[in-house]
């Protein structure tokens, strides 16, 4: 989906919502349909797609890493009562698959938001972040607003298919969602437009920002850990310190769901400042309590770090 196509979709969806007749204001969650997302990020992206038309919850608690999450029996119970389970796929949240089997759900109850996006348009995946990856692509597609727009489209299409009586309500909600993503993309683009390309460099904790960096022409100088759940080796730390010194980066970013002792010691070694916290795989307290506001907070902090 190109950036222009998102704008076209917004216009088309607004039109179809306007043509949808006088359904009036949507009643909140009257359908009884329940969406369960693996993470708070996908739950909020589902709200961009669906508004208040259905109930939306998530599994991974605030402050916990999705890559290494270990579900409990109560998480299996959440799956059992869901009509639709949404996950990213691409190796991020595969732990949900056994829960679905245990809850006697079928694979058709599951929507893999990030997979198979390259078939119908110009979307191009990035390679996996680390050499030990078991999947073919970097999973962090949603950190480009255009990736998030794909997720909104998929969620809206699927719930409309399951609950046709909610069609007008959902198309109206997702038209607003697409407009918000389009505005986000334009604002982030404007934020970086005045920053010289040689300053557009970042260091983050884990390798989540590849799609964001590609969208806004930013270079990722390095990351503190190659893969969540694994501490970096002395050699990796030394290489990152060299890269930070060579690049002139003065800020390294921690992330909300990861403790950052490694980053703190790398920063002390290089004279860089550790700036907390970017939102990557999890939302948090305000301003990171919605996908849109978290992305705006990320962009503002990153752009500020490049003003030197
Ligand atoms: Zn991640």
Image: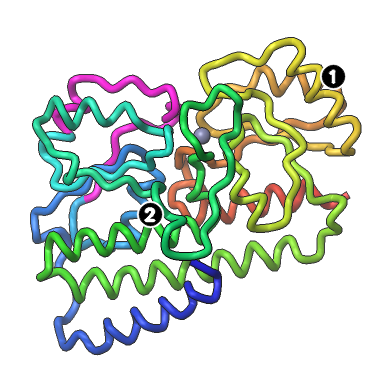
Q: Residue 208 sits in which quadrant?
A: top right
- Image-quadrant location for residue 71: top left
Residue 306 vertical position relative to residue 22 in the rendered view, above or below:
above
x then y, percent, for residue 34: 16, 49
**Residue 130 left/right relative to 158:** right
Q: Main secondary structure of the magenta part?
A: loop
Q: Closer to the N terminus: mark 2 or mark 1?
A: 2
Reading the image, the residue beneath label 2 is: 45
Residue occupying image coordinates x 18% and y 32%: 100
The residue that appears at 13% across and 59% down in the rendered structure is 162
The Cα–Cα distance between marks 2 and 1, rounded to whole angstroms, is 38 Å
Q: Magenta segment: does it hold 38? A: no
Residue 276 as seen in the image, left or right of residue 247: left
Q: Position of residue 160 (x, y in %)?
A: 19, 65
Give the residues in magenta. 56-78
Q: Secondary structure at mark 2?
A: helix
Residue 82 location in percent, x, y?
15, 42
| Nearer the observer, 135 or 75 | 135
The foreground one among 244 and 136 is 136
- Residue depicted at x 20% and y 85%: 20
The residue at 19%/47% (across/down) is 84
Residue 1 x, y percent position in the rendering: 48, 66
Is label 2 within 8 A of ligand 1 (CB to nearest ligand atom)? no
- Within 10 Å of disc 2 (Cα), the crowding (few <14, some 14-19, many 20+) is many
Task: Say which mark, if any, is on residue 269.
Answer: 1
Q: Residue furthest front?
A: 119
Above or below, 122 relative to 265? below
The quadrant holding residue 169 is bottom left
Label pair 2/1, CB-CB below 8 angstroms: no
Viewer-side residue, 214 vs 256: 214
């Amino acid at each position: 989906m190109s950036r222009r196509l998102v704008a076209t979709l917004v216009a088309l969806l607004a039109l179809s919502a306007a043509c949808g007749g006088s359904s009036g204001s949507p009643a909140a969650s009257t359908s009884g349909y329940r969406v369960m997302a693996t993470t708070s990020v996908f739950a909020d992206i589902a709200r961009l797609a669906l508004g208040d038309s259905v109930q939306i919850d998530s599994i991974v608690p605030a402050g916990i890493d999705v890559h290494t999450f270990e579900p409990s029996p109560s998480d299996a119970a959440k799956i059992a009562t869901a009509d639709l389970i949404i996950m990213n796929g691409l190796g991020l949240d595969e732990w949900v698959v056994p829960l679905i089997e245990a809850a006697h759900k079928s694979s058709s109850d599951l929507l893999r938001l990030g997979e198979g996006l390259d078939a119908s348009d110009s979307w191009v995946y990035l390679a996996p972040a680390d050499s030990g990856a078991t999947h073919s692509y970097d999973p962090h597609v949603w950190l480009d607003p255009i990736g998030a727009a794909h997720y909104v489209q998929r969620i809206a299409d699927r719930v409309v298919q399951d609950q046709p009586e909610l069609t007008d309500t959902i198309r109206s909600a997702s038209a607003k969602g697409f407009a918000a993503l389009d505005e986000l993309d334009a604002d982030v683009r404007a934020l970086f437009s005045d920053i010289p390309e040689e300053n557009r460099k970042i260091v983050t904790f884990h390798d989540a920002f590849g799609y964001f960096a590609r969208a806004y022409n930013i270079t990722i100088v390095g990351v503190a850990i190659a893969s969540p759940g694994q501490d970096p080796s002395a050699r990796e730390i030394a290489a990152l310190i060299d890269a930070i010194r060579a690049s002139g980066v003065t800020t390294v970013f921690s992330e909300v769901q990861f403790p950052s002792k490694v980053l703190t010691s790398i920063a002390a070694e290089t004279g860089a400042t550790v700036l907390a916290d970017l939102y990557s795989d999890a939302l948090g307290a305000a301003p990171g309590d919605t996908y849109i506001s978290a992305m705006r907070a990320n962009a503002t902090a990153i752009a500020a770090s490049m003003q030197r």
